[in-house]
Amino acid sequence: MPASNRDEEKGLFTKGCKFASDLFNLDLSELRKQREEKRKRKAKELDQEVEEEKEKFKEIRKKHSPGSPKFKRAKHRYELALRDHEKEMDALEKDEFKSSIKFAQIDAEPFEVRYFAYLLGIIVFFISIAAFIYILFFTGIPFIFKLTTLMPLIILPILVIGVVMNLPRYMAKRRRAKSIGRMPEAINYMIMAMSLTPNLSRAIEYAADSVEEPLASELRKIIWDVEMRKYSKIEDALMAFADEWGKWSPEFRRSLYTIRNAAHKETQEEINRSLEKANEIAVQGTENKMRTFAESLTVPAMGLFSLGSILPLLLAALLPVLAIGETTAEMIIFLLNVVIPLGFLTYSIHILGYRPTMRAPLSLPDLLTDREKQMVIAASLGAGAPLVFLGFYWRHDYSYLISIVPLWGIAVAITIYCFFTSYFPYKQRDNLLEMENNFPNALFHLGGYISRGDPPERAFEKVSESIHSSSISVLFEKISYSLHVTRRSLHDVLFASGGVLEKNPSQMITATTTIVSRSIKKDPQTAGDTLVRISGYLTELQNIEEEMKSRMTEITGMMKVTAQFIAPLVMGITAVLYVILAGYFAEIDLEGPMAGMAGRIIGEDVPIGGFTFSMVVGIYLVTLVLLTVFFTVGIESGEDWASRKMEVVKILPLSMALYTISALLAETFLGGMV
């Protein structure tokens, strides 16, 4: 999900909290006062409890020697009381719920969130009551099934309250997970800056300018705390930051401590050794986190695979029998096209929220104008709508398999929209990824030429001739040409108005070339060595990312195969089998003892017609493809919507083709059974 969408989510949640505050007419100042008084009372109670244990221990100490069992038990109880007191006081002071709201950047008070949860719970409660009344009096569901819907409808409002109350904690955890995932990159930028100029303030500022939110704000806060006199020195602020984040990433804390120590080294050789150690710690920690995430993903991914793929396929295989009994059409449609997809989507978003992000997402420009977007939407609807219309128009005159026509209309509309809105961004993305992947190698060559004494313009020219990457060659050739022609500094050639990298979407290349332009101002040997070390840092991070992608692909491969091949084959056969069994049971006339047992499924009207049933199954197939692509691409590449759309273009038509073929073949070979 793009960052703008996440900001919109937070804005909507904040507006909901403010609306609930106004609706219930909350007095914020009075509630804050009550909260503070409650906190003080709780603190006083905790102090009193530990004081009582202290007095008991004093009494025991007067009467018994230190070696006696009673003395030891009393001492142990007192130490436990002190430890519990410290933990509870720490939790009371920090107020974890309030801290989560603040960290998630939700502009609301805890009681506003609470009342917003109550408001949504009340709304859902009345909706649930209305739904139960409708099910009770206006549906043909057997009475026993009507009663089974009562418990979920009662639990739903409580569930909504719990979800809304815990949403700030979940948002804070997601934000923290993404921040921790980007910390190796921040460490890398700090090491780059420190290797050039051993100044902590500049290194932190450079890292804050080079990484994206939310980590950028956290790094800027270090400098802000010093400027606001919260800490007297930048080292103290950095160590406080390291200790705070070290609770979630001990390796990150150790790296920051090592960088702090590097600032106090006297020689450049000692500084470089400390920085290499910091990089080694960060890389090792990142490898461990990637490995841990990949291992921890196995069970959730299998659960999601079972929920979104295996369970619906089993259900689809049983539907020809289930749908002819007492199960109603509404229940089948609601389960297959609403409940399971919503569960799949919700669980997918939950899992993706904890995926570490190693690479800054590419800031690809929106290449389509508003008018062009409208034309794409019109073209997709124009291609799909006639097929949908014809399918429903012909449904009474042709076989139930005419349902394939409107399903193709839906698939064609989605495919056309995804293709034309992602083709050019996807091509640009591939070009930029190739550039980023080859950039460390180009930087290594550039450092070698610079250290030999070649001027920058000649060094860039040699790299463009020797490197086997069209995108890097073109980039370095432009830089060399601009340096030759304009005679401006490298920084101006890169970043000034009309510069080569002025609008480059790759944050990694932009941030790294900033250090390159600064290092070249130094002597050739120092500049060359700095570029070679930076190349090594970037290569190590890329190796970790490639390893993570390889691990993720092993987990998501089966989900793609199911959505692309297995699901359409099963769904196509199921649609035909449903109609065959419906006709078969309708023609049977049983007598004797078996008639009572079979009466529930034989001789009754089919709750869903063949056309409708095929549509329900086909729509779920389309939904399954979209949700599977959303999850698998999100796991492998992060929030890459261009890749998601192009993956839909590749998979959806093939799935629909297999669905069509399997349904036609099943009709051909099994049709004689009707």
Image (spheres, helix red, strand yellow):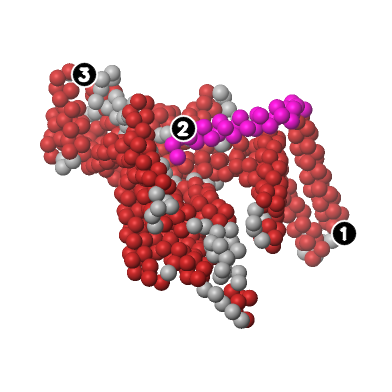
* Residue on which disc 3 sits: 488
Task: Identify whether 599 is placed above or below 195.
Answer: below
Local crowd at mark 2 within 10 Å, few (<14), some, or many (≥20)? few
- Residue 333 in view in this figure: yes
Instruction: Nearest to the eye among marks 2 and 1: give it.
Output: 2
* Residue on which disc 2 sits: 4
Local crowd at mark 3 within 10 Å, few (<14), some, or many (≥20)? few
Q: Earlier in the sequence, mark 3 or mark 2?
A: 2
Indicate the position of residue 259 as horizontal and vertical percent values.
Answer: 42, 39
Residue situated in front as seen by the camera: 85 or 524:
85
Q: Secondary structure at mark 1?
A: helix
Residue 270, located in which quarter of the rendered image?
top left
Local crowd at mark 1 within 10 Å, few (<14), some, or many (≥20)? few
Instruction: Nearest to the eye among marks 3 and 2: give it.
Output: 2
Residue that appears at 47% across and 70% down: 584
Question: In the rendered structure, does residue 365 fall within the stretch colored magenta?
Answer: no
Residue that appears at 13% across and 29% down: 458
Q: Which residues are magenta?
A: 1-30
Q: Distance between the Cα atoms at labels 3 and 1?
A: 87 Å
Q: Earlier in the sequence, mark 3 or mark 1?
A: 1
* Residue on which disc 1 sits: 63
Question: In the rendered structure, does residue 6 fall within the stretch colored magenta?
Answer: yes
